[in-house]
Amino acid sequence: MNTGKLNQIQIPVLGLIVLLFMGCATEDTQTVVNFTTRITMQDEFNVDGAPNGNIWGFDIGTGENGWGNNELQYYTDREQNVKVENGVLVITAQREDFEGSAFTSARMLTQDRFEQAFGRFEARIRLPFGQGMWPAFWMLGADIDENPWPAAGEIDIMEYRGQNPSVLIGSMHGPGYSGGDAISKEFVIPNDRFDTSFHVFGIEWGPDEVNFYVDDVLYNQITREDVTGPWVFDKPFFILMNLAVGGTFVGSPNAETVFPQSMLVDYVRVYENTNLNRN
């Protein structure tokens, strides 16, 4: 973990507040956990060029069976697909013939660089648009090499179908509740779209629950009691950000899909819950 002077920054984030579910078909309310946090990792993407190698690595290639989802892109670390420019990270999907694939893009991850259990994880992102665009901001259990998916656990902080620019999904996957059986909920942004401006997507994760929010609107809470198999969210996870093209979740691009398409990230920030009893 490369935190440096960031551990010295104390930041009160949220007190005990009640937020209405918005963009969901429910009249329930939920409470955001009352804690003070300190920042443990942040990337403000203020230095042009390649992303910070102390924080980010890359998955390269097509993965097994299109990264397990029948995706169509070849992931690279080329400037054409990923760069920091004018204060934002730009992940770009291109239509091009490359290493046997018809599309290219990028997938970044903090594995072996930054991994943390519990806290507040958030990013400010503007999403792409179009049939077949599949951006995601998500997390995997750091033990995934020893416990292959879904045993290691997955938290999808944000994933989105480019053909539905006002709807996103937050999900959790684990043993017995993965893929199409994941524990999920949609958020519909009122009178707006996610591809026309930046929005903050995040979770607050404690030992027994994960709260999902958009622009500080809490729209979903998943607890130990909600999952239909073992709770595997009590260990460090790492962060991933990617822009996939095609796949079972979104379908293939069509004649109306415009390329290139980009996912713009203003910042990624992670906070630690200082009130948790750590052994």
Image (tube, rainbow, N blue to C red):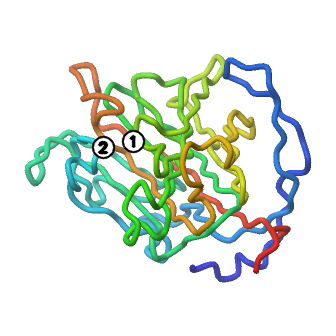
- Give residue 83's position: percent from left, percent from top: 39, 58
User: Of the residues under marks 1 and 2, which one precedes in the sequence?
Assistant: 2
Quarter of the image holding residue 222?
top right
Picture quarter with the C terminus: bottom right
Residues 177 and 263: in front is 177
Residue 169 is situated, as x and y percent measured from the top left of the image, at 53, 34
Q: Amino acid at mark 1?
A: Ser
Q: Is residue 263 visible?
A: no
For residue 248, side relative to residue 221 (left or right): left
Inspect this view and state whether residue 155 appears. Answer: yes
Q: Compared to 82, does 9 lie above or below? A: below
Between 271 and 206, the one lying in front of the other is 206
Q: Which residue is depicted at the point 62% across and 39% down?
A: 199
Secondary element at image label 2: strand
How far apart are labels 1 and 2 at the CA level? 6 Å
| Residue at 74%, 37% in the rendered image | 218
Q: Is residue 184 left or right of residue 97?
A: right
- For disc 1, the neighbor class at 10 Å (few under 14, some 14 to 19, many from 20) is many
Circles 1 and 2, Cβ within 8 Å, touching? The answer is: yes
* Residue sitting farthest toward the right: 16
The residue sitting at 85% across, 68% down in the picture is 275
| Residue 64 position within the rendered picture, expressed as x and y whole percent measured from the top left | 21, 54
Element class at badge 1:
strand
Report the quarter where the N terminus lies: bottom right
Q: Which mark is residue 262?
A: 1
- Residue 231: horizontal and vertical position, in percent? 59, 55
- Relative to residue 15, is residue 257 drawn left or right? left
The amino acid marked with disc number 2 is Ala
Q: Tell me the residue that label 2 is attached to.
A: 93
Residue drawn at 78 percent across, 68 percent down: 38
